[in-house]
Amino acid sequence: MNIRDSAIKGVTCKDKGLYVTLPNGSHAYFNFYWLRDNCPSSFDSITRERSFDIFHLPQAPSAEVAIIKGDNLVIHWAGEDHVSHLSLDFLAAYAGGQRRPDPANLLRKPWFSDHLPKVKRFSQPELKDNPALVIKWIEALLIEGLAILTDMPDSESGLTETANLIGQIRPTFFGAFFDVHTHINPTNSAYTAAALELHTDTPAEEHAPGIQFLHCRANTVNGGLSIYADGVAVANDFREVDPKGFRLLSEVAVPFYCEHDSYDMRSRQTVIELDEKGDVSGLTISQHMLDISDLPQEVLDNYYPAFCRFGKMLQSDRYIINFTMKSGECATFDNHRIVHGRKAYVAQSGDRYLRGTYTDRAEMRSNYRALVSQGRFKVN
Ligand code: OGA
Ligand code: ZN
C-alpha cells in the first residue's frame, strides 16, 4: 500500500518525509533519512553507540506504510525488510529542530566585587567520597565560574587526585602541571615576584585549557594577594556601554604568543568569547602574552581604543575580588571566563608556592550530566 500524500491515522506522507500528529495535537514534520537513521534498532544496547550505517542503504529511505499505533509511529520501509517503531514522545522531543535538552546548560550568573563572601567553598576530603557534593562544586563552576577548595592534602599527588574528581588532567605545552614560585632565570612573569595583571592562562594554545586549579602549598610572603574577576560580568557591561567596541573584541581575532628557547606557541583568539546563542561565555586576555599585533593599522585605529576601554573596565573596582590564599586552599575556576592575577610580593619575605593544573570544560559537563541524569540509554 502506498500512502503518499494521504492522511492515515495522523500521518501524512510527503516526498522527503512525513507529518505526524503528536500527542499535543501539533503536526510535526520528520525527514525520512532522520527517521530511518534514528530507529531505536540503530543503537547497540551494550555499546550504546549507533550501529546502523546509513551509508549502506541502497536507495533513499521512504515509507511503504506509516501509521500511528498506540504511542508509536510505525514505519514499514520501502525496498527494505525493516519496520521502525518510534515513540511519539521521542518524536515530540525532536519536533521543530530544537536542541536536545542539556542538564549541564546552566545559566551563568555574573558576579561583582561583593562576591568574595559568597564564593562557594568545599572541603577536598569531603568531595572525595561524596558525588552529591561534586555536583554542587561543578554547578558552582558552571554558574559562577569560581569555587575554592579547602583542606587540600599537601602531597605531590594531591592536586591530580583533586582534578580527577571532575576530569582528566589536560596537559599544556608546559606539561601536566606547573609550579609557581620565584625562579632564578624566569621564563614567565608568573615565576617572578612581580604583579600579574588579570589574565586567562595559556592564550597562545589553540585551545586553551578549560578549568584551572591553583593549589596554594605555601604563602608566608608580604603581598602576593590573589585577584579574580568575572569576565562575563565585565563583557556584558561592556556590550551595554560600547556595542561597537564589543563587536570588535568579539569578532576580530588577535595574536597571542608564548616564546622562549625551546618553544614558540602562537594562536589567534577573540578577546571576548560568545556561545552559540551569542551570549558572552568567556574571555581570552593576557597582557604578557599578547603578541605584536599584525592587524592592518587602520583596523587598530578602532581596535586599540576599544581594547583599552575594555581593559580599564576589567581592572576597575566594580568587578575585582582579592584575598590572600592560605596553604591548603585550591582555587578552581573556568579559565575561559574568570580572569585571575596576583599582586606583587616581596620575594625574600617568606615562601610562596602554588602548584597549578588544568582539566577540560567539556569533560566536566560530561561528568555533570552523568552524575545528575539517567541519560538516554540508562535503565534503572
Ligand atoms: C599563573 C598565575 C597566580 C599567582 O602562574 O599564571 O596566574 O598567584 N599565578 O601566582
Ligand atoms: Zn595565570
Image (spheres, helix red, strand yellow):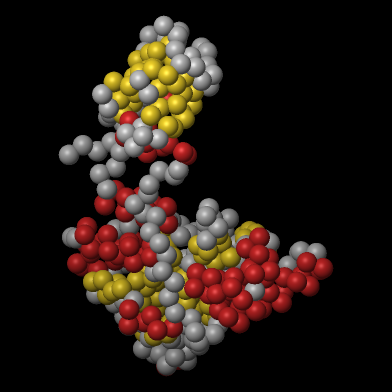
Q: Nearer the viewer, residue 192 or 5?
A: 5
Residue at 38% over, 47% down: 101
Q: Quadrant of the N terminus?
A: top left
Residue at 78% over, 66% down: 299
Residue at 21% over, 59% down: 132
Query: Can residue 277 be seen in this snapshot?
Result: yes
Query: Can residue 90 be seen in this snapshot?
Result: no
Q: Is residue 202 left or right of residue 12?
A: right
x and y percent of residue 372 in the render?
26, 52
Q: From the viewer's perspective, is residue 29 above or below residue 224? A: above
Q: From the viewer's perspective, is residue 32 above or below residue 156? A: above
x and y percent of residue 147 in the render?
34, 71
Image quadrant of residue 93?
top left
Q: Nearer the viewer, residue 317 or 82?
A: 82
Q: Nearer the viewer, residue 98 or 305?
A: 98
Image quadrant of residue 95?
top left
